[in-house]
Amino acid sequence: MIVIMRLKDFERGMKKSVFTLAEAALVAHGDSPAALRLNLHRWTKAGDLLGIRRGVYAFPHRPSSTPEMIGALYPPAYVSLESALSQAGLLPDVPFETTLITPRATRSFSTPRGRFHFHRIQPRLFFGYDSKTLFADPEKAILDYFYLKGSSLHPQPAFWEEARFQNLDRVNWSKGDRAARVFPQGRVRTLWASLKTYAKAHRRP
């Protein structure tokens, strides 16, 4: 016999805003896998849960943090590239999707909480982010951007003008110099040095 757990009992036991099927099983430990899947299906169909991706759910009335979303969606990863650059005020436009870095395969997910695009990077380059917020340091976000978009970027002052980088006085150039040396691609370091020179030439008085 399949036991139907009540939603309010499940919600009381599940402390996370976003959770996986495995985490749901820990809360509904008295139910069979079939009963749990039936409940999750019914609650999602009724709008009491959001289906984030296969095997990942969220409570629609609970706000979810970035670390929660990443942890349930496709860990390990951190926010970088356009999303982190916009958050840091280094680029003026807000991207329509959240851009992230992962040592796993490149993947994209369209969810009720937005679109998330995970870019693969070499495992040894997976560093330079806040372990609590999972946002890249501004310097690492720039280097990640150069690493993945470098073929379309040009180390010239006129290009940096068109690229609309701003507030470059917020960048810790010494910190970025150290991180840049880890990247194997010479083009990343060339772009970094060019942007650094441009920033110093256009430093605010």
Image (cartoon, rainbow, N blue to C red):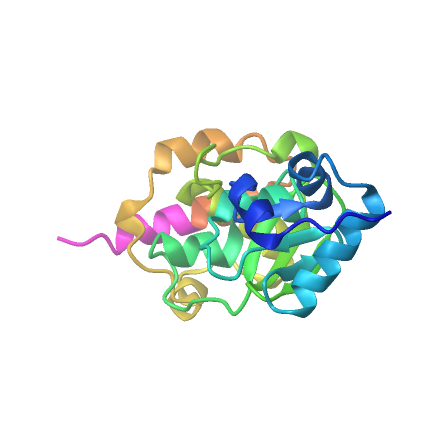
* Residue at position x 46%, y 48% in the image: 65
Above or below 88: residue 111? below
Residue that lies at the very extreme toward the left in this rendered image: 205
Q: Is residue 85 visible?
A: yes
Q: Nearer the viewer, residue 9 or 72?
A: 9
Q: Nearer the viewer, residue 23 or 169?
A: 23
Left or right placement of residue 95 versus residue 50 in this view = left
Q: Magenta: predominant secondary structure element?
A: helix
- Asked whether 197 falls inside the magenta stretch, the response is yes
Residue that lies at the very extreme toward the front in this rendered image: 1
Total marks shown come to: 0
Residue 194 pos. (x, y %): 44, 50
* Residue at position x 54%, y 56% in the image: 59
Left or right placement of residue 46 versus residue 55 in this view = left
Left or right placement of residue 160 versus residue 48 in this view = left
Residue 5 pos. (x, y %): 68, 49
Q: Nearer the viewer, residue 169 or 136?
A: 136
Provide the residue span drawn in magenta: 195-205
Using the rendered view, name the quadrant where residue 14 is placed: top right
* Residue at position x 54%, y 31% in the image: 181
Using the rendered view, name the quadrant where residue 41 is placed: bottom right
Residue 151 pos. (x, y %): 64, 58
Q: Is residue 155 visible?
A: no
Residue 117 pos. (x, y %): 64, 58
